[in-house]
Image: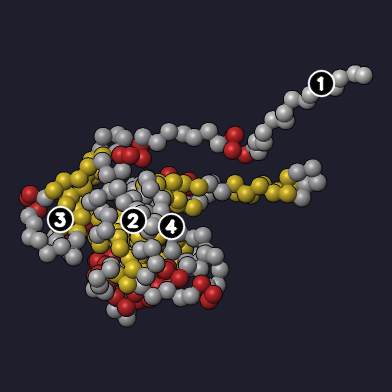
């Protein structure tokens, strides 16, 4: 089974649960969560993935601060695909809690990633599951399963980011401190409520040739063209099986520039924020000599 077929099965399992308020979820109570990184939502997704796949599939949950969060492997033919999970909670005004960008802690997003199978390092495709939960965290109101290349296709850049973190020891006057050099990457947030073509939908976005290769072109409702800074155009299909309207691949709506707002960001000066500021003392009154 090809990697996109695995993602489509997961997608169908999740949208099969859609109710009046989105996709209902059941999370463990926070009191039984093991660690800060042990997210109950990730665990719930893992359970749903296992339900969606036949017995010949294995599902592995990576350790904390490790990309991808979940690795899926077909024991029969060795097919493997990674799934990174990104979750946000809706604000009281209905928007997402981040806006233009979302954090990718210490690991640049990419459609390919490295894992170890025993002692061997293997490169596997990587998809991203973006979920916007409602204010009560009881339902998924936006679900996007996304080919990681849609955000970044530069695998060399991804590899460089994986090994750019380090810790510096013997710091400070007593040599007892250390500095953790851990980069934080902010890349586009597909859950941004201002992206109307994604917001409040349950969709898959993957490469046009990949959908065509496995003959999965039903319920394709839009095509998206991603143009890189070198002028290359990459075509993606948006699949929405919750939409029963008939569409033709010849007359698809075309989306471009979905993340253009990210390019208009202006660098912020952050040094002043590290220094406390207090009011000036009032001027002293001169003392009259008697």
Q: Which residue is mark 1?
A: 286
Which of disc 4 and disc 1 is earlier in sequence?
A: 4
Q: Which residue is mark 4?
A: 114
Counting every numbered tag in the picture gives 4
- Give the CA separation, mark 3 to mark 1: 79 Å
Which of disc 2 and disc 4 is earlier in sequence?
A: 2
Q: Judge whether 160 appears above or below 238 on screen.
A: above
Q: Which residue is mark 3?
A: 221
Which of disc 3 and disc 4 is earlier in sequence?
A: 4
- Give the CA separation, mark 2 to mark 1: 59 Å
Q: Judge whether 280 appears above or below 216 on screen.
A: above
The reply to whether the C-beta atoms of the residues labelled 2 and 1 are less than 8 Å apart is no
Which residue is at the front of the view, 101 or 120? Answer: 101
Q: Nearer the viewer, mark 2 or mark 1?
A: 1
The reply to whether the C-beta atoms of the residues labelled 3 and 2 are less than 8 Å apart is no
Q: Nearer the viewer, mark 1 or mark 4?
A: 1
- Give the CA separation, mark 1 to mark 4: 72 Å
- Give the CA separation, mark 4 to mark 2: 37 Å
Instruction: Kindly identify the residue that appears in the image at 42 percent across and 68 percent down.
Output: 42
Instruction: Kindly identify the residue that appears in the image at 35 percent across and 63 percent down.
Output: 134
Q: Which residue is mark 2?
A: 94
Secondary element under disc 3, as helix, strand or loop, is strand
Say if residue 123 shows up in the picture.
no
Say if residue 174 shows up in the picture.
yes
Which of disc 1 and disc 3 is earlier in sequence?
A: 3
Q: Position of residue 138 (x, y in %)?
A: 37, 70
Q: Position of residue 260 (x, y in %)?
A: 30, 39
- Give the CA separation, mark 4 to mark 3: 32 Å
Which residue is at the front of the view, 128 or 120? Answer: 128
Q: Judge whether 83 appears above or below 56 on screen.
A: above
């Amino acid at each position: 089974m090809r990697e996109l077929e695995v993602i489509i099965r997961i997608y169908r399992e999740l949208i099969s649960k859609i109710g009046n308020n989105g996709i209902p979820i059941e999370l463990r109570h926070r009191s039984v969560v093991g660690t800060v990184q042990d997210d109950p939502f990730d665990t719930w997704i893992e359970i749903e993935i296992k339900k969606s796949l036949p017995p010949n599939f294995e599902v592995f949950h990576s350790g904390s601060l490790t990309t991808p969060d979940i690795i899926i492997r077909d024991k029969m033919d060795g097919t493997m695909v990674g799934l990174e999970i990104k979750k946000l909670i809706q604000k009281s005004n209905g928007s997402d809690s981040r806006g233009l960008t979302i954090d990718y802690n210490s690991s640049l997003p990419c459609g390919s990633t490295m894992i170890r199978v025993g002692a061997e390092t293997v490169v596997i495709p990587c998809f991203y599951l973006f979920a916007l939960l409602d204010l009560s965290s009881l339902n998924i109101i936006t679900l996007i399963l996304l080919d990681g290349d849609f955000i970044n296709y530069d695998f060399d850049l991804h590899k460089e980011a994986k090994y750019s973190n380090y810790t510096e020891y013997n710091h400070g006057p007593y040599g007892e401190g250390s500095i953790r050099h851990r980069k934080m990457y902010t890349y586009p947030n597909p859950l941004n409520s201002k992206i109307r073509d994604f917001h409040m939908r349950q969709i898959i976005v993957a490469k046009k040739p990949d959908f065509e290769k496995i003959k999965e072109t039903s319920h394709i409702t839009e095509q998206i063209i991603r143009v890189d800074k070198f002028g290359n155009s990459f075509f993606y299909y948006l699949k929405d099986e919750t939409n029963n309207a008939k569409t033709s691949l010849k007359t698809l709506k075309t989306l471009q520039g979905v993340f253009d707002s990210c390019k208009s960001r202006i660098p912020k000066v952050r040094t002043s924020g590290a220094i406390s500021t207090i009011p000036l003392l009032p001027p002293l009154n001169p003392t009259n000599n008697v």
